[in-house]
Image (spheres, rainbow, N blue to C red):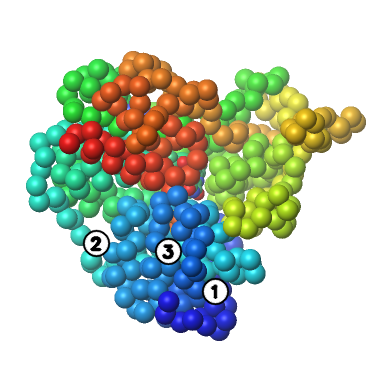
Amino acid sequence: MGDITGFLKTKRKEAGNRPVNERICDYSEVEQILNSEDRMLQASRCMECGIPFCHWSCPVDNLIPEWNDLLYRGDWKGAYKRLSETNNFPEFTGRICPAMCEHGCVLNIQHEPVTIRENEVAIVERAFAEGYIRPQPPVIRTGKKVAVVGSGPAGMAAADMLNKAGHEVTLFEKDEKAGGLLRYGIPDFKLGKATIDRRLDIMIREGLTVKTNTEIGKDISAKQIINDFDAVCVTIGAGHPRDLSVDGRNLNGIHFALDFLTAQNRLNDSGFPENISKISARGKKVLVIGGGDTGSDCVGTSIRQKAESVTQIEILPKPPAERTTNNPWPYYARVLKTSTSHEEGCERYWSLSTVRFIGKDGCITGVEVEEVEWVGANGKSVMQAVPGTKRIIEADLVLLALGFVHPVLEGMITELGLELDSRKNVKVGKNQTTSHPKVFAAGDTVSGATLVVRAIASGRTAAKGINTFLK
Ligand SMILES: Cc1cc2nc3c(=O)[nH]c(=O)nc-3n(C[C@H](O)[C@H](O)[C@H](O)COP(=O)(O)OP(=O)(O)OC[C@H]3O[C@@H](n4cnc5c(N)ncnc54)[C@H](O)[C@@H]3O)c2cc1C
Ligand code: SF4
């Protein structure tokens, strides 16, 4: 521990965000970067607790107190080395992780946790700037061939680990570029795509083969992949979106959130491909159904597209401002979150269910909603409509941000006959093994839609499992 009184002398200081009036005119990242001196001071606030709950809260087991100490001492290179032992892509998590670590930080008992996530991204960005992240191809190749199918964070992490272990790895991706939801789901204002390209470039120079525009189960059969490779890792995400089957669902102007976000990401990335129709919020009254992070990304994107108004509704009750007694520290705090997109201008409502979509001439014009109450019964929370509370919210673009139910089963998963769990995710055992002896699986395909950091963690576990299997 570098400075035993650091947390007493130095207050938490965040880098902060670009001003709202500036950032809503472009898609560049919203979050700013703190200067190195302040960043080192922030690291000095880490108390290096006997039981580091931050480490316990981090799905990739980042050695947080250790790299905070190195950072405080100005050993940026040492800090990066320690960070890269547990996390293949701190430049992703340092930008977009919800930072469960900070919820578990002991200083969070006083609501002033160490700026762990920002410290993480500062360390890795310094490492790139100073050039000590360079391609390091393995010295020895094992002669074993591994196919990783799906290039999101789970697939990228598995591919990175397996390539570094000396196997000949091919990363297959059905889209035109690799990155999964990092590239086509998460908006640029949270994660600029140059960050993904920079890392992929290093991985390719280390010997990884990336084959895009190749859907396994369609362009190449799954059986062919099984024949051609010694092991296969399935990381195809959880691409089946949850729908809302109420009257009027077939009206024009109702879209899945991901279709809307992907269209804008493609436009920012490489101009608009002819075969994809652009969904635009420009001049529209936008209603986002679903109060989670995907919904919030729709809010920020609609605002940048110059929507007339943006409203977001959620069926669950408004979360409390502070932790409740059944959600104590050091667990992740289930409290009201206001994202940078919400700050940019949006009406938010909770405890509203969607009764029906209303339209004219085949196009959406509004949504009938009704207030609901959540009442406890037999240990469960049950939803009840509140009589006399139906009303109409005007909308000419509705975005369904209701989450994802499970992976797309048609194609690869069905062809291989992989066993599923009760939620129709691919069932895995220890080390991410599936019911097929040569096939492993990781990421959202296994867990259901979750987080980038969890996808990286399970991709790493799958790689370890494959490594052991190949030996
Ligand atoms: C809009 C949105 C915003 C999000 N924001 C955040 C955030 O801020 N922070 C956070 O931590 N998490 C966020 N998430 C969640 C996070 O993006 C996912 O949990 C994570 O990307 C899952 O990684 P994955 O590798 O399992 O799958 P994915 O990222 O979904 O990647 C799967 C890849 O497999 C490809 N694929 C599918 N089928 C095939 C096939 N048959 N052949 C070849 N390729 C195939 C897909 O095209 C895709 O590229 C967000 C999710 C969404 C939708
Ligand atoms: S990956 Fe997420 S939980 Fe882990 S240290 Fe980084 S910000 Fe915290």
Where in the figure is residue 275, as x and y percent of width and height?
39, 28
Residue 133: image tag: 2
Pick whichever of labels 1 and 2 is earlier in the sequence: 1
Picture residue at 52% right of the left edge, 22% below the top: 422
Judged from the image, the secondary structure of the residue bearing numbered disc 3 is: helix
> Which residue position is annotated with label 1?
13
Q: How many marks?
A: 3
Ligand 2 is within 8 Å of the C-beta of the residue at disc 3: yes
Pick whichever of labels 3 and 1 is earlier in the sequence: 1
10 or 431, nearer to the observer: 431
Q: Quadrant of residue 443?
A: top left
Q: Is residue 318 left or right of residue 135?
A: right
Q: Distance between the residues labelled 3 and 1?
A: 18 Å
Judged from the image, the secondary structure of the residue bearing numbered disc 2 is: loop
Q: Distance between the residues labelled 2 and 3?
A: 20 Å
Q: Is residue 9 above or below residue 136?
A: below
**Amino acid tagged 2:** Ile
Residue 64: image tag: 3
215 or 364, nearer to the observer: 215
